[in-house]
Image (spheres, rainbow, N blue to C red):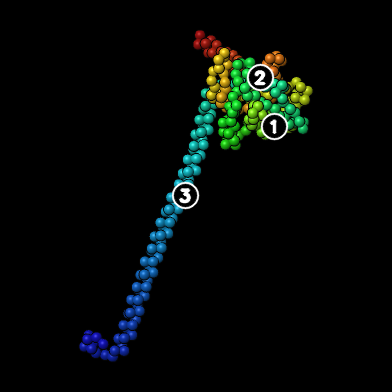
Amino acid sequence: MSAARRQIGGSRYLYDSFEAAEARFEAQERVFEARKEALEFRIARLETAVERLEKRLWLAVYGVVAGVLLHGALALVSIAQREEKPMEYKFTGAEVGVTVFEGHRIAGYASVFGLRDKGGDTVAPGAYAASLKRMATRGDKVRMLWQHDPAQPIGIWDEVHEDAHGLHVTGRLLPDVARAREAQALLEAGAVDGLSIGYRTLRAEAVPGGGRKLIELDLWEVSLVTFPMQPEARVSTKSDTLAEIAALTARLRDARAAVARL
């Protein structure tokens, strides 16, 4: 018994129960503090983990956004490059081989490598590779048009690829499209026997004696066309008809503007 208690007096049994209770209470407080500290430590670790997860999620979001923006920028650059280059057209005729099978399916060479056309141009092997790869990346396809008219799609080119000979295409006319049914009838009758590509020249080099070697082309579409009747034009010739029409339209527009200013 303590000296203070001896001075006060009284039985030790009166105080021992209070001392035990106080000791238990203090022990419980220490346990509570220890558990509290452990819980705070765990909460801090969880907060750190959540912060790391948030950072990773934001990095992933930024990566996706950056990828989308990059894809969009590349698409805009591609469109801008296309708009800077004039559209050109090149015919291949029956001698190259346009085959009609299963009624509405067609196949043939839309372009032949190394063959000098009437305009003096030759297409180098691999000229379409980059363009076809870009289309595949975008999930796009080469269009099948009637006479290069973008308002008249008549079918789908299921396969467009380069081989040692040239640009080979395989596709199908769509029976539900009226113009496609007409094209099929004309093909079967031999009234239409040519394929023609619509493209823009991205890289070319001049060749001695005139003309160009077309190294990289941006392919847009392959059309079924009424092939020119001149024998020398049946192998491969360049059509400037649409370009001439566009130039004539521009001259008429300039003339109208000049008259309006009078």
Q: Secondary structure at mark 2?
A: strand
x, y (%) of residue 158? 67, 34
List the single residue furthest toward the top. Answer: 262
- Please report contact status of discs 3 and 1: CB closer than 8 Å, yes or no: no
List the single residue furthest toward the right: 189
Residue 123 visible in the displayed image: yes
- Give the percent coordinates (x, y) of residue 112: 65, 24
Q: Give the Cα separation between the discs numbered 3 and 2.
A: 56 Å
- Which residue is disc 1 drawn over? 171
The answer to which of 142 and 76 lies nearer the viewer is 142
Which tag, 3 or 2, sits closer to the chain's start?
3
The amino acid type of the residue labelled 2 equals Ser
- Does the CB distance between marks 3 and 2 fall below 8 Å? no
Q: Which residue is at a point 53% across and 30% down the rendered structure image?
A: 78
Decide which of 171, 76 is in the foreground and name it.
171
Alpha-carbon neighbours of circle 3 within 10 Å: few (<14), some, or many (≥20)? few
Element type at marker 3?
A: helix
Q: What residue does disc 2 label?
A: 236
